[in-house]
Image (tube, coloured by chain):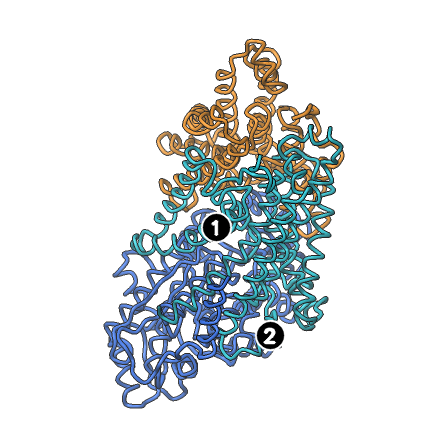
Amino acid sequence: MSMGLVSYGVFFLSVVLILGIVALGLNLQWGYTGLFNAGIAGFYAIGAYTHSIITTPPRADLIANMGLPWVVGIAGAMAVTALAAWIIGLATIRLRGDYLAISTFGIAVTIQLVTLNFEALTGGSQGFTGIPRPLYGMFGSPFAFNLFYFALLLAVVALVYWGLERILRSPWGRVLKAVREDETAAIALGKSAISFRLQSFVIGSTLMGLAGALYVSFIGFVSPFDFLPIVTFQIWAMVIVGGSGNNKGALLGALTVWLIWASSGVAITKLVPPAHAAQGGAIQVILIGLMLVLALLFRPRGLIGEETMVSRHADER
Amino acid sequence: MKTTLGVAAALATIALMGPAPASAQQVSCPVKIGGILPLTGSMAPITKKIAESAQLALEHINQGGGIKGCPVELVLRDDQGQPTVGVDAAKYLVEVERVPAITGTISSGVTGPIISSVTGPSKIVQISCCSTASAFTLDGRSGGYFFRTLPTSKTQAFATASEITRRGLKKTAIIYVNTDFGVDMTKFVKLALPKLGGEIVAEVPYNDNQSSYRAEVTKALAAKPESLLLIGFPKDAVTIVREWLSLGGPQQIALNNSMRVMDFVNGVGPRFLNESFGMDNAQVAGPTVDAFNQAFEAKYKTDSKGPGVHTQYDALMVLGLAMNIAKDLTGPSIKDAVRQVHAAGGAQVGTGPEEFKKAISLIKDGKPIKYFGATGPIEFDANGDVTGPALVWKIKDGEIVTDRVISIEEMQALFKKVE
Amino acid sequence: MLGQAIADGILTGAIIALGAIGVSFGLQILRFANFAHSELVTWGAYLALVFVTFAGPGTPTGPLSFGWQLIAAMVFAGVLTGVLAWVVDILVFRRLRNSDAHPLSMVFAAFGVALVMRHVVVLIWGHGSYFYTRELQIALEVLPGIRMLPDQIFILGLTFVVVAAMHLYLTYSRTGMAMRAMAESPSLARVCGVQVESVVRWTWFISGGLAAMAGVFLGLTPQLHPEMGFNLLLALFAAAILGGAGSLIGAVVGGLLVGLAENLSVLFISPGYKTAMPFLVLLLVLFFRPQGLFGEKEGSR
């Protein structure tokens, strides 16, 4: 295997892992709780910008930069995203599914507009340059840094995965599923559905914020362009393709969808002559749309599908 | 778990050794140049001509002798107008295709992360045809590896301000697209216009892709301006100008370079644009510009007007020349060579395969060259930006015609006056 | 300036309202968020363009920039778009409805359908812009400080007439009553002998027709392009939910509120935030009335 391919592979998988964390967050909200969060890009953006503001050294044209260490940035990004999710959740969590979707979508649009218009804080449309990467100076080559970061991401994903599996198998996780399946029954059993849904919403969104912070400290640049609604669509595709209600599925979905997404452009450019690139692009999107519709019609459970067991003891009955 | 550790250990060993540097002494044929453009997605309609222009430049380079005796291959990848996709494409080009230089891309939101995460750290020269965000080239943030062949917004903004005042228009309202391009342009116009005797009475940003802009137009009109400066892109601009005129706005409308296309003129209706005028960077008349236009029209049977068409050609030609000048095909050598493409006292070379051939033989003899491209003279400043002359265009009998040219000397005088 | 902003807001709102009625019916009668509705708006506009290409927009009649041909084109497009909506239902949504798929499968399917429909427009007509008419009107000062185009006054008038007619139709016709019964409780309606499939068909047909009308009006001010409907999507949803799903009057009031919120907001804050306005109004309303302004409170779901 050529060196270049390894180097590219590490980079590619790093992006998959970051997107995988977002997908895990959505899977908690949607797959396990039934919350239709259509504002993923918004929480991702809050994490990304909070981290950028905390870690980038002060600069004359920006008001809030702090230049604090990477770890503080990550913690801050998670804390701020959690807070934002809690406030947004308080206002919206009671809404019926599709209303919640439109509301959260609207919030994500608003957040993106703030990153675009609040220039003194976010750098506006110019973007935010020079975001420090952790321990970057210690590595001699970009490849060495990427490898280190990849290992770091692997560890974070493993931790997140383990943590999610644990809480989902705990009594808390079972209540969550009960709330999703039959809210009335869950309420009758004395569980406050709203508060469980809110907790799940906040935890899931915090993971999205974490992923945003990990993304910007990997790339070193952030702009409002990174948080267009297409990001939300991609993450949803990952969870649906992988099979919602299954954390392995979410990660596998992240890999599959990102692989197809990144390579479909290559395929089109190889297959369609440049003169017809515009039509080629249209056909590409039509195929994506058709795939989505056909998958829903003929394979509604995704690649893996939901895990049937709720607790470890369920299959022992 | 054990296998994971094993793999990690193996990777760590590789990391310590580092990837083999793109070995330079022996050039292996063919030479690859990376290209990144939004071939699909919302930018695709503009990209079509830009990609064609890149193909034309590639053809000219190959017909003119290639790079260091090798044929050249352009490995073009799609960024879909999405930052993550663009970064992935760049990483692929640099690592798997091992390209020593990249041309691209259009949106600043995609170019930015490519510079910071791929071409900057890997020391790969990147020349963009179209990304305007001024932040990329400030303070050496790209490590000197990023160049662009389109003049910064500053040139166009100052020229616009001077033309507005030259026409005696005192009170101007600005409606600008809320992107790095629009924001940058507005910033520089605001700097220049008051110093030249004009006044800005309203500044209204707009977000693209909306069905109506009456609210924005109404807001701008409330300040009772004598003229409008519209900075944006053709599709939305058609809506804005039509709404502006129907709500009784004055016909004195200043436009930016993107509007110098017939789609815009016909969309609004040429008879309503008799009083309006526009700016464009460089693209001055001249033999090298004409040669490019003719070559483009002959090959693609369509005119070469449109954003990025000329600058993309130059981006690739500059790479072609620089890679011939460079002592080897490594990033640092190419970076230094880019600055020798328009050397003081060099022999003039232009566009087209014959001129490229001439340039190569001059380079072989160790003589300096001075490249005049599809956008006129291409000389990079310390930041990797080009400055150039500007031209004023207007609409006459339904056609876009050049009104006057603002020479480099005039531009420099203007820069002095404002700064 | 305030007066002008209100006038502009009402005009924008009227067009949004026409589209929002279909979304609102979709949410309540068909029970899903139809993200493909905006594409019906686009298709309506382009189908009218086909008619106009053959018949011409007509010579300007009186103060208007077009003739009877454009009205005929609108009727033509309305019928065809209604049929198109119904065909899409047969191909995709009915299958999902009849299988035991998750209700939100419909929403995702709508997403896919929207992608296909939008890009088929790109494939046929390309990315460029089209115009029904090249005329450019100068606004009349209808009230001191308020300018409107004759076309816009016409749009407002016609919208009002159509909405009023729809309201009467839904209130007094058998189909209208069946639709309202479905909106209130599908299971109850079925028990009472409402022909569900027939109601569904009419719902699609009416939604499609009104969407086409919105599309033509949108194309008249001033251009058609493949994203024209899509760019309006969120405003349509905000309006429908704001008014309360299933309510015709609600959708109209919602549309007007969204239009006004967009146009009035620029007087107070940067127009850069304009696109967020519908949502902020929506959030505010939902916070106090989770079922929307005119929506019925739902029982347990």
Is residue B161 depicted above or below C250 in this figure? Answer: below
Image colour for chain A is: cyan
Q: Chain of mark 1?
A: A
Instruction: Please indicate, yes or no, whether residue C164 appears anywhere in the rendered image.
Output: yes
Q: Residue at left 40%, top 40%?
A: A291
Q: Nearer the viewer, residue A246 or C47?
A: A246
Assess whether mark 1 and mark 2 are in contact (beta carbons under 8 angstroms). no
Residue C296, given in percent of the width and then of the height, sits at 69, 23
Instruction: Check the picture and name the quadrant holding the N terminus of chain C.
Output: top right
Amino acid at dot 2 = Leu
Is residue B396 at least partly visible in the picture? no
Q: Which residue in the protein does label 2 denote?
A: A135
Q: Position of residue B170 (x, y in %)?
A: 64, 62
Left or right: B71 as drawn, with respect to A185: left
Q: Position of residue C23 (x, y in %)?
A: 56, 30
Is residue B368 left or right of C64 when viewed as pictured?
left
Out of A147 and C120, give the one closest to the viewer: A147
Which of the 4 image quadrants contains residue B356? bottom left
Tell me the CA gap for discs 2 and 1: 30 Å
Q: Amino acid at mark 1?
A: Leu
Q: Please name the color used to draw chain B.
A: blue
Q: Is label 2 or label 1 in front? A: 1
Q: Which mark is residue A252?
A: 1
Q: Colour of chain C?
A: orange
